[in-house]
């Protein structure tokens, strides 16, 4: 038989008999858990891990003589796999964010809200509903900001990897004049 909407374990699909407030109350833990999980696992764990892996890869290449810098695929592959899984996590999190946001907007329409938050002064809107509404919006805003930061980290690591193969000494700093102006020259360090 076809699964019915609102089955246990799928809080983002409302039952047809479920009211807007009931669904909003079930949506709150989905939004807050998504933001918390993304911060703990993707920002604090994966972002730092791929940033360190990219830096160590570039330092490893920089320690070798300039004329013997062949690509070591056994060292590079774990980093590429980490970047790929990070991109999959971005897609998955964006899909969840979009789904929660669209359901949030649907409930707004059902409740007749036109502003960014439900009006607090109206007696027909319980204080608890206003609190839950703000928590969901705050969680979605934080999740969007963290997703943006995570994408920037992934892009930085990708540029760092490319520049590890473009720069003579494999190290690169962010410079805004030109992309190759950021290449670090280690000739003076090696001579000392």
Image (cartoon, grey):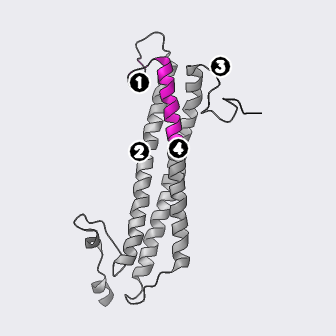
Nearer to us of marks 3 and 1 is 3
**CA–CA distance between discs 3 and 4?**
26 Å
Q: Which residues are magenta?
A: 95-120
Name the element at disc 3. loop
State which quadrant residue 33 falls in.
top right
Q: Residues within 10 Å of mark 1 (few under 14, many from 20)?
A: few
> In this rendering, is residue 103 above or below 77?
above
What secondary structure is the stretch in magenta mostly built from? helix
Nearer to the camera, 58 or 162: 162
Q: Earlier in the sequence, mark 3 or mark 1?
A: 3
Question: Which residue lies under the disc numbered 4?
Answer: 95
Question: In which quadrant of the rendered image does the C terminus lie?
Answer: bottom left
Which one is earlier in the sequence, the residue at label 2 or at label 3? 3
Label 1 sits on residue:
117
Q: CB under 8 Å between callouts 3 and 1?
A: no
Indicate the secondary structure of the residue bearing disc 2. helix
User: For mark 2, what is the residue?
Assistant: 145
Residue extending farthest top? 123
* Chain-order first, disc 4 or disc 1: 4
Q: For residue 98: magenta? A: yes
The answer to whether any part of residue 45 appears in the image is no
Say which residue appears at 38% left-offset and 90% top-offset.
67
Mark 3 highlights which residue?
17
């Amino acid at each position: 038989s076809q699964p019915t909407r609102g089955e246990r374990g799928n809080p983002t699909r409302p039952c047809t008999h479920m009211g807007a407030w009931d669904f909003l109350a079930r949506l709150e833990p989905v939004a807050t858990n998504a933001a918390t999980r993304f911060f703990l696992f993707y920002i604090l764990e994966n972002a730092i891990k791929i940033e360190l892996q990219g830096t160590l890869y570039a330092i490893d290449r920089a320690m070798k003589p300039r004329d013997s810098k062949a690509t070591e695929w056994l060292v590079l592959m774990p980093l590429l796999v980490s970047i790929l899984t990070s991109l999959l996590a971005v897609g998955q999190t964006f899909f969840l964010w979009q789904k929660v946001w669209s359901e949030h907007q649907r409930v707004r329409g059902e409740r007749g809200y036109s502003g960014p938050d439900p009006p607090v002064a109206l007696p027909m809107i319980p204080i608890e509903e206003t609190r839950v509404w703000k928590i969901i919006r705050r969680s979605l805003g934080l999740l969007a900001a963290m997703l943006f930061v995570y994408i920037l980290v992934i892009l930085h690591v990708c540029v760092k990897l490319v520049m590890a193969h473009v720069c003579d000494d494999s190290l690169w700093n962010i410079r805004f004049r030109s992309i190759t102006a950021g290449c670090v020259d280690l000739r003076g360090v090696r001579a000392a």
